Amino acid sequence: MTDPKELLSEQQPLQLSEVQKALQKADLDGWLFYDFHGQNPIAKTMLGLQKTTRRSFALIPARGEPVALIHAIEHGVWDHWPWKVLDYRGWREMEEKLTVLLRGKPRLAMEVSSHSNVPTLDRVPSGILQLLVKIGTKVVSSGDFVSTFHSVWTEQQLRGHRRCAEIAREVAMGAFKRASEQVRHGKPLLEGELGEWIRDRLYDRGLQEHPDCHVAIGKNAADPHYDPGASGDYISKGEILLIDLWGKENTEGVFADQTWMGILDRQPSSRVQTIWEAVRDAREEAIKFLNDSYASGEIIFGYQVDDVCRNAISKSGFGDFFVHRTGHSMDVDLHGSGPNLDNLETRDDRTLISGVGFSVEPGIYIPGEVGIRSEINVYWGPEGPEVTPQKRQYEILTLLE
């Protein structure tokens, strides 16, 4: 029977004994979770919290029993917490009890990031950090703990992701076919119409949690987050078509997130082909780096993969037009809390630990001309990097013969 102390959240169990071993190895006195109104989704997920409206702290000490410090009106939210609960009514009492709780524990991990380098990790307000400094606590980043105990995929999540990846690929291929058929019939679809078709198909095929997409043609795709809403421009003959689509099976699952490129013509122009090859080859350089690093047993970090991919695009002459990170973490959130492949927007120096997943999605965006991206997903597993979907794109799909 499962120990209730090892299962606080269906999405990501809190593995108390393993967390404490990791804290001891890192010479830390504990992991302190802080939350207010759900602003720390890592705490919310790992502690199995529902809606909270008052400040709360949960201390996982390196040794001994965890303790929660909560407001007196929120015991119902913490009914599932199997350890000791302290409560407070006013701010003075909160500070007094927090001081006592942290006595003898000068080094704690929290969801912070130096210089806010990793915004998805930086969840503790400056005022709380000032309070902890006043108490005498030194706070260090919980980054690698979050990766290990929050963002690592379970076997069930991996199997679900594989299913979602193949479904997303099939839906993307169906969307390209539908767009081309409408052009042949002289009734081209609007970008928004094709987007709605994709969302419906994702949902019908089993990606029923947050199924969504971006559909963009030509110069519209030069905006990486272009959203046509329900309308947009017509997907007409000769247009480059970008389809970015994602979704997952259920709340506890992991997303599949892919981007595919097609052209409503017999072949792309030499200019478009050159841009595509720069994107594709940069993607392959990143995958090669991941494979080589695994084979050599080398420990690598998210920013290093970004460097490899970005340098490849820079050598092709398009470096100024690769305006976002190479990839984002993926866990129960589409943009997860684990390591990103990023040395542009931030410097993500977290370790790629076994069991995390992320996207690899280089893109070149030339304003007023075209945007081209290729996106696959990688599971950094114990047997090496696993790329999904099984068949990735090597050439732009020519949709009119």
Image (cartoon, rainbow, N blue to C red):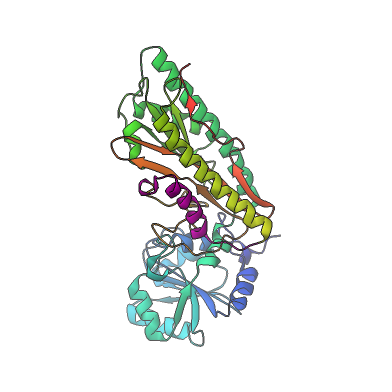
Above or below, comparing residue 84 to residue 51 in the picture: below
* Residue at the image point whose x is 48% and y is 87% from the top: 103
Percent across and percent down for residue 286 are 54, 49
> Furthest residue to the top?
185
Above or below, comparing residue 40 to residue 287 in the picture: below
Splitting the image into 4 quarters, where does residue 14 fall? Answer: bottom right
Q: Is residue 319 magenta?
A: yes
Q: Report whether 82 appears left or right of 309.
A: right
* Residue at the image point whose x is 48% and y is 21% from the top: 177
Q: Which of the two residues, 237 or 253, is positioned nearer the viewer here?
A: 237
Q: Does the magenta stretch include residue 323?
A: no
Percent across and percent down for residue 248 are 52, 42
Q: Quadrant of the N terminus?
A: bottom right
Percent across and percent down for residue 226 are 33, 39
Above or below, comparing residue 197 to residue 298 in the picture: above
> Furthest residue to the left?
368
Q: Which of the two residues, 258 or 272, is positioned nearer the viewer here?
A: 272
Q: Which of the two residues, 244 or 5, is positioned nearer the viewer here?
A: 244
**Total residue callouts:** 0
Percent across and percent down for residue 123 are 40, 65
* Residue at the image point whose x is 44% and y is 16% from the top: 181
Q: Main secondary structure of the magenta part?
A: helix
* Residue at the image point whose x is 37% and y is 85% from the top: 134
Splitting the image into 4 quarters, where does residue 228 fall? Answer: top left
Q: Which residues fall within the magenta stretch?
A: 298-321
Splitting the image into 4 quarters, where does residue 212 fall? Answer: top left
Residue 246 visible at all: no
Residue 166 visible at all: yes
